[in-house]
Structures are given as C-alpha cells and as structure tokens.
Image: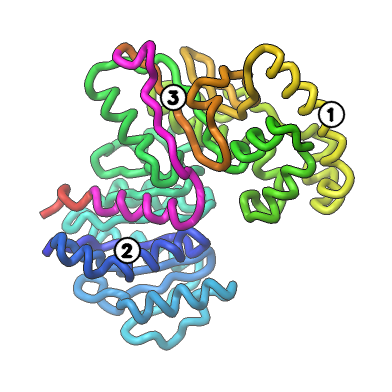
Amino acid sequence: MKIIPLILMGCGGVGRQLLQHIISCRSLHSSLGVHLRVVGVSDSKSLVIASDVTQKELDDDILAEVYRVKSVGSSLSTLTSLGESQVFSSPESRTKVLDIASILGKSTGLALVDCTASSETIGVLKGGVDLGCCIVMANKKPLTSTLEDYDKLVSHPRRLRHESTVGAGLPVISSINRIISSGDPIHRIVGSLSGTLGYVMSEVEDGKPLSQVVKSAKSLGYTEPDPRDDLSGMDVARKALILARLLGRCIDLGSIRIESLYPEDMGPNKMSVEDFLNGGLVKLDNNIEDRVKQASLNGNVLRYVCVIEGSRCDVGIQELPKNSALGRLRGSDNVLEIYSRCYSEQPLVIQGAGAGNDTTAAGVLADILDIQDLFT
C-alpha cells in the first residue's frame, strides 16, 4: 500500500469538498493500492494535527467533524477534544507545519496542499520546497507572486502539481507541459478561463442586458459575493500569468493589460456592492450592447479571454469567429485553444467545466495522487 501523507491548508469551499472526496474515495483508493494519510488540516487561524504525525492520522471521523465545523463558519480552534489530535493557533501553526515538513518531507514526500485564496501560505510553501515536500495548489496567488517566489516554487517541477490553479479539473497544465517537453514550441494561447465571464458573455450575445445577466449569475451562485471580483478580470489575469510563466515569460501581473468590465469610479472603494448592483451596473448596458451588435455585423461574437502570444499577454473582451471553439462557447464552461508547430492550423482545444468547488477539489485530489510514484 502506497501511503501519501498530506497537510491541507484551507477549509473553504474547495478544501471542505476535498475532505469529502478523500473520505468517499477510501474504497477506490484502497483498490488502487493508495492511502491518503491526512496528518494536518489548517484554516487561517488554527491547525489540527495528528498526535503522532510519523505514525497516526486524522481519521475520517475527525475529518468529518472538521468539515462540519467549517461549514458553519467556525474556527478549527473550537476543536479541542477530537480523539488523538492536537490544535495549534497562529502563528505557532505555521511553525508547526514546517516542523512536520522537516520530519516527513524528504523521507515520505509529505504533500502540502494549498486550497486557500491567500498569499500568506507562500512562506510555508517555500519552506516546504527546501524540506523536500511535494506541493499541490489550487491557490493561484503563490504562483503569481514575485518571480523570486515563483522560481523557488517551481524549482523541483516533479514535486509540484497545480492543475487546479487554471482550469479546475481540466488537463490544462499537464497538456502544456507535455507539448513543451516534446519540443513543440507553443506560440499562442487563447482561452476563456472564467466560468462567470463565459456565462455573462454568452448571455449578452443573446440580447440580454449586462445588468440583468450579472444579477442572474449572482443568484445562480456563479459570481463572488461582490460580482466586481469577477468583472475586474483579475482572476483571469492570474491564470494567464501562470500560463505565460509556464511558457517561460518572465513577467508579473503589472505586465498584463487587463480590461475591467466596470470603470474605476465604480470600484469597491468608491461604491458599495448594493449601489453597484442597483444603480451602477445598468449604466454599463449600452456600451456592451453596442459592442455585441458591432461584433455581430463583423460575423463575430464577444468573449472575455486571455491572449498569450510572443511578448503579449492581454486579458479582456475580444471579437472571435462564431465557428471557433471559443465562439461556440456557451454557459460557464472553460475553453482553451493552444497553437504550436504541431497544432498550427487546428489548435489543441481543451473544454469543460472550469469552476466549482466539486470540480476543483476533484482536480486537487487527482494532483495529489499523481505524485505517488515519486516516493517508495
């Protein structure tokens, strides 16, 4: 039986779903000869670890209780009597993670699994790299930090998995890595990498006002609580930066041209969420409607995409042919077109659900299992 010890950082929607996946897949993993030994789980304030990380684990009853406590918004610090476990508070929890990494890193390939949405995990992840740990990320911020941080995190590529930073469970990173390692130069990537903005753009194409579509997307749970977090394009920009750096571009977020769908005077520091939804959003309708009509006259459609080509890395609305993979996109799917020497006339197209806690957690779980052959 192959044992993979791991520490989960982050108990939000993705982290909690990952715990559920681990528990529900015990029988499947056993038939594959694999066991995921969860030795620790942390949130932003606390860390719960097994009493003896070299031999024991947080059993499924404890993991289920962690899921329950975090689902109601409580801190892991409230878990004071959970079997053979210990609870540590920040900042001691970060030190404790690295202590465990020093014990299990090089000998077992301890996986540090980052399902947070925070840049505060960067120090722990970099420490884990030095201690021989495997790094699995759904969190985009570490890989979109400084180039110095990025270079450290990718310094041992065989011990790094981060598929879910770009396309949730879609094989985006692995496909690009396979093309690169084959010696086939990638010269252009165009992708719709936001399920929210994919839905918005396909709906306005049908003639619906942007304000109505955004409100519908919010009610369906597609957007963040403040839809401007999606409409700003920053999430897509981070994904684009990860892809550009994967292609060898030495750039940072400031190098990317980002088109926001709302003006600066409607930003979060100028207007409340309620005011934006009830008064600001409707003011954006005419501009988008005009652009949709002009694109249609040109035989095209509008999509919110990232474009990586040469030194160019842009994020924003583009006119695209109706019959292209991106032009046919409907709903909240992600679509990526990869152009290379071998895929010059007909690009490699990757399409599917690119968002959602369940899909993203499944992608993280697959990444964890993918590192099993690195250690005996």
State whether residue 364 is above or below residue 295: below
Q: Is residue 349 magenta?
A: yes
State whether residue 352 is above or below residue 48: above
Quarter where residue 7 is shown: bottom left
Label located before the other in sequence (3 or 2): 2
State whether residue 214 is above or below residue 308: below
Residue bearing mark 3: 337
Residue 190 left/right relative to 318: left
Residue bearing mark 2: 99
- Which circle, 1 or 2, is nearer the viewer? 1
* Residue in the foreground of this view, choosing between 321 and 78: 321
Rendering coords of residue 185 (x, y %): 32, 15
Disc 1 marks a residue whose amino acid type is: Asn
Q: Residues within 10 Å of mark 1 (few under 14, many from 20)?
A: few
Spatial distance from mark 3 to mark 2, Cα to Cα?
43 Å
Secondary structure type for disc 2:
helix
Residue 136 left/right relative to 278: left
Quarter where residue 361 is shown: bottom left
Label located before the other in sequence (1 or 3): 1
Q: Which mark is residue 286?
A: 1
